[in-house]
Amino acid sequence: MVLGIAPRDQASGLRSVPAASRTWTLAVTSGKGGVGKTSVAVNLALALAQAETRTCLVDGDLGLANVDVLLNLHPRHTLQEVLAGRLTLDDIVLTGPAGLQVIPAASGVEALANLSPPARRALVDRLQNPSTRADVTILDTGAGLSRTVLALVMAADEVLVVTTPEPTALTDAYAMIKVLNQRRPELPVQILVNLADQATQAREVYEHLARIVSRFLGREIPLAGWVPRDPCVERAVREQRPLMLYFPYARASEAIRGLARRVAARRGEVRSGGFWGRLVEAPDGERSSSDEGK
């Protein structure tokens, strides 16, 4: 069962928020690479768009961007040029399958991988643009606990931590949850178990992690769902084809479609300031090493 936000009159809570900030943002993140985080983010965003939810996918893996690769898109421009002031967001936003809006990042650009507060402010000034209006924004972050990853994650309305049955993935997922709990304990966090062989394994993985979180952090973390290990996922990545389009009846596709329904149902209050505004206010932080919080 997924614990959701109680239904409310969303309109009353959003009247004071600027139109460009009203999108509800879900950060998809992980404590380590190799857990299928980007594939989950891309296909979750696509499943929402297919269900006629206005959706924007932001490639927030600023150091190693590959959202465009999985969608077989070919961006001519990236966030790097917006940050530099040469282009506006309108110039770089791509329209993907099912009307999905995609904001590409800049692969391999070191400056974007470690944004300073002034650089973040400059970026936000250029990102407040009507072209990005969406009901839901899915943010694919980098993996790990770098300063930039944490700033992006903590600016979201909710966080989905992706893990797998591998012990190292569980250890790093706990490290991510621990740091988020220390810095922003009120931030809603859920767990998604990816690459599980069967439902019982996914449940065991979740319960193991949830027990550790409860014992050491005193917090209950709900299970968002699980995605089975499916050869169609690897094939889709290899062929640069969106899983949800080319293998819509694969087991993984069905699982992500179910996750999309739950995400749409639990989409709740947009926190004050909107995602980009909160990113500007994010603390720079003194620590940025990959072992922070372990």
Image (tube, grey):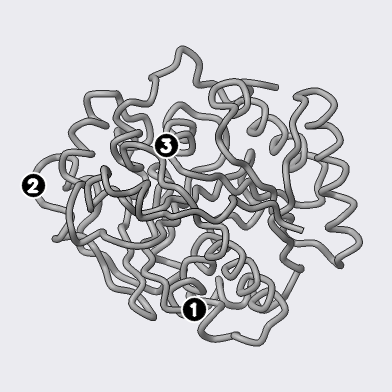
Pointer 3: what residue?
155
Mark 3 vs 2: CB contact within 8 A: no
71 horizontally vs 132: left or right: right
Q: Quadrant of residue 174?
A: top right
Mark 3: few/some/many CA within 10 Å (<14, 14-19, 20+): many
Q: Secondary structure at mark 3?
A: loop
Q: Quadrant of residue 226?
A: bottom right
Going from the N terminus, do you reach mark 3 or mark 2 first?
2
User: Is the N terminus in the top left, top right, bottom left or bottom right quadrant?
Assistant: bottom right
Pick out the residue farthest to the top. Answer: 286
Mark 1: few/some/many CA within 10 Å (<14, 14-19, 20+): some
Mark 2: few/some/many CA within 10 Å (<14, 14-19, 20+): few
Q: Secondary structure at mark 2?
A: loop
Pointer 1: what residue?
241
105 horizontally vs 243: left or right: left
Mark 2 vs 1: CB contact within 8 A: no
**Image coordinates for residue 208, horizontal then vertical, percent:** 87, 42
Q: Kindly report which numbered mark, 3 or 1, lies closer to the viewer in this rendering.
A: 3
The amino acid type found where label 1 is placed reads Arg
Going from the N terminus, do you reach mark 3 or mark 1 first?
3
Could you tell me how far apart the alpha carbons at marks 3 and 2 are, in whole angstroms? 25 Å
Could you tell me how far apart the alpha carbons at marks 3 and 1 are, in whole angstroms? 30 Å
- The residue positioned 41% from the left and 60% from the top of the image is 136
Going from the N terminus, do you reach mark 2 or mark 1 first?
2
The amino acid type found where label 3 is placed reads Ala
- The residue positioned 55% from the left and 79% from the top of the image is 244
**Image coordinates for residue 278, horizontal then vertical, percent:** 34, 33
The amino acid type found where label 2 is placed reads Arg
Pointer 2: what residue?
86
Could you tell me how far apart the alpha carbons at marks 2 and 1 are, in whole angstroms? 31 Å
226 horizontally vs 117: left or right: right
